[in-house]
Each structure stands twice: as structure tokens, then as C-alpha cells.
Amino acid sequence: MKKLAFAIGASLLSLGIASGSVAAEERFITIGTGGQTGVYYVVGQSICKLVNRGAAEHNIKCTAPSTGGSIANINAIKEGSMDMGVAQSDWQYHGYNGTSKFEETGPFEDLRAVFSVHPEPFTVVARDDAGIASFDELKGKRVNIGNPGSGQRGTMEVIMEAKGWSLGDFLLASELKSAEQSAALGDNKVDAIIFTVGHPNGSIQEATTTTEAHLVPVEGAEIDTLVSENPYYSKATIPGGMYKGSDEDTNTFGVRATFVSSAAVDEEVVYEVVKAVFDNFDRFKGLHPAFANLKEEEMISAGLSAPLHDGAARYYKERGWLK
Ligand code: GLU
């Protein structure tokens, strides 16, 4: 009799444990990335890989589909169809403040910074046979200015406005997505492509190996003004020798890739995501060559203009990185 009572007790106990872990309800999160051949896609996939490894403890399941890029991600987070996403530092700034492309929709006050990732130089690649040695020589040429919703399309429009250019200044202004444009350059459908992207990456490698092509510098008075007047831009250099056809350094300007979320996303969820990345930081850095030089101290402040998400701040305080 005693034995039976013990057995029942034990099975009740194990039931209790089982129902306890079921009660720690499964949560699914989605991270907005970019085109499949870009670095944002690897950022999202890498974060999810690290989060999903810990699912037994926190029960968070993470997916990171390809998307249209920065601006599309911020809009999706605002609508609540995505929980987190990668976005250029310039579009994080404008999203939060309701400026530039976000003027019509207004400030997204709940936008939250989580951390920044790799630097992203504004990158222009031209076919060698197109006669484009400087950014201004894009005028009159067939240029892929990028899909609406992408960070590079937005930033390209900012440069065009600074220079007083319109779409009519190009022979063709195509709107191919980042994953399609390297092939279009190789097939001679366009003379030049643009991509705000971390280096080195497979997409620019494809563009510079499938045809004779080179990186084009983006500099001059308008760029100097953009960089000196806006905290989210800085001068950038793509090292010579990184890509075929570009042995010298290429001067341009750039932004940072940043990871953002919304105040509407649970503190605990953001905490667990941040913890998955920084508790496994060496592993994370090994997942793409553009992550090789990442430093924790820089990632919690550089390029961030929206307030830090509470879940991120909690982890940074725990590590002693924030007061
Ligand atoms: N910076 C690009 C964008 O905001 C995406 C870069 C990438 O896919 O790595 O759309």
C-alpha cells in the first residue's frame, strides 16, 4: 500500500514537472533580414541558430526569413508582423524620429535598439566596359538603384537628393532586389549596382568575378556634408585586394547594420535573444567574415539612436557593460 502511494506520488511529481514545462509556453519570434545573398540574412540566421540551441531552456523558437531590407523590416516591426530585424543605422534613426522616408508615417516611438553589428559601406560596383570611374559618372547609365524597402535604395535617394538628381538622370533606373543584381551586372543588363552591405560578402564577390568589374568611390562635397551633418554616417574604406578588379582602397561612406525591435516585444524574449548572442560571442563572430572584428563595447552603442530595449539593457547591466 505504502509502495503504491509512493508510486502515485512520484508519477504526480513527474506529471507536475511535465506540465510545468508545457506551461512555459512556446514563443515564436521572427527576425527580418534582407536578400538571401546579403549579410543581413546571415545575421538573422546566426542569431536564430544560437537562440534555437537554447530552446529547451527558454522555449523560444526563432525564424529569420529573407525580406526587402532595412525599411521593410522597420515597417514590419511597427505593424507587429515581425518581432525584430536588421536595419541600417540611418534608417533606425529616421524610423524612430519620423524623418526622411518615415516623415509620412511619423515617429515610431516604440522602436528600440538592441545592438549594432558590422559596418556597411555604401558600395557601388560598375562593369569595366561602362566607363564609370566616379559616382557622378553613373549619370546617363543603367543603374540598379535597388528595391523599395531596401536600405540602399533609401540611402541612394538621399544621395540623389543631395546632388539634385532625379531618376531621369539615368538611362535606366532598375529596381532589382539585392539577390538579383549581381547576375544582372554579369549579364550586361545594367552598368552598375549599389549595395549598402558588410564586407567581404559573396554578393559583391559574384559581381566582380562573373564579369570584369570594379568598385567605384563615393566621395566629394555632397558626401562630406552628409557625413558631417548626420551622426549615423561615417567615412568608410573598402580595402584594396578584397575583390577582384579593385586592387586599391575604395573610399566611400557608410552606416552600421543594427539590430532593432519594439517596446511591444516582451523584455524576457529580447533578453534571451541578446544572451544567446553574447554568451556565444566567439561562435557568432565565426559565422560570417564581416563579423570578424565585432567588439561587444562598440556593439552596445555605435550606430544606435533609438533607446535600448529593456531586455537588452538588462543583459548589458548584468555583464557590467552598462551602469
Ligand atoms: N543594408 C541593406 C538593407 O538595408 C541590406 C544588406 C544585407 O542584406 O546584408 O537593405
Image: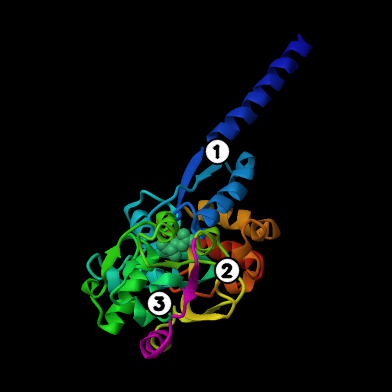
- Residue located farthest toward the bottom when viewing the structure as drawn: 221
Q: Earlier in the sequence, mark 3 or mark 2?
A: 3
Image quarter hosting the N terminus: top right
Q: How far across and how far down the image is residue 316, in percent?
A: 60, 66
Q: Which residues are magenta?
A: 211-227
Q: Is 257 one of the magenta-colored residues?
A: no
| Residue 24 image label | 1
| CA separation in Å, label 1 and label 2 | 49 Å
Residue under the image location 59 percent in, 44 percent down = 52
Amino acid on which disc 2 is placed:
Tyr
The residue carrying pointer 1 sits among few (fewer than 14), some (14 to 19) or many (20 or more) residues within 10 Å by Cα, namely few
Q: Nearer the viewer, residue 234 or 139?
A: 139
Q: Residue at x 63, y 69 (%)?
A: 294
- Rounded to the nearest angstrom, the CA distance separating label 3 from label 2 is 17 Å
Residue tagged by mark 2? 243
Q: Looking at this view, is 120 or 241 the one in front?
A: 241
Q: What is the x, y in percent for residue 167?
A: 24, 71
In front here: 9 or 152?
152
Give the image quadrant in which the ligand numbered 1 is located: bottom left
Which residue position holds label 3?
132
Q: Amino acid at mark 3?
A: Ile
Crowding at mark 3 (Cα within 10 Å: few <14, some 14-19, many 20+): many
Question: Residue 321 lies in what quarter of the image?
Answer: bottom right
Secondary structure found at label 1: loop
Rendered location of residue 237, percent (x, y): 54, 79
CB under 8 Å between discs 3 and 2 = no
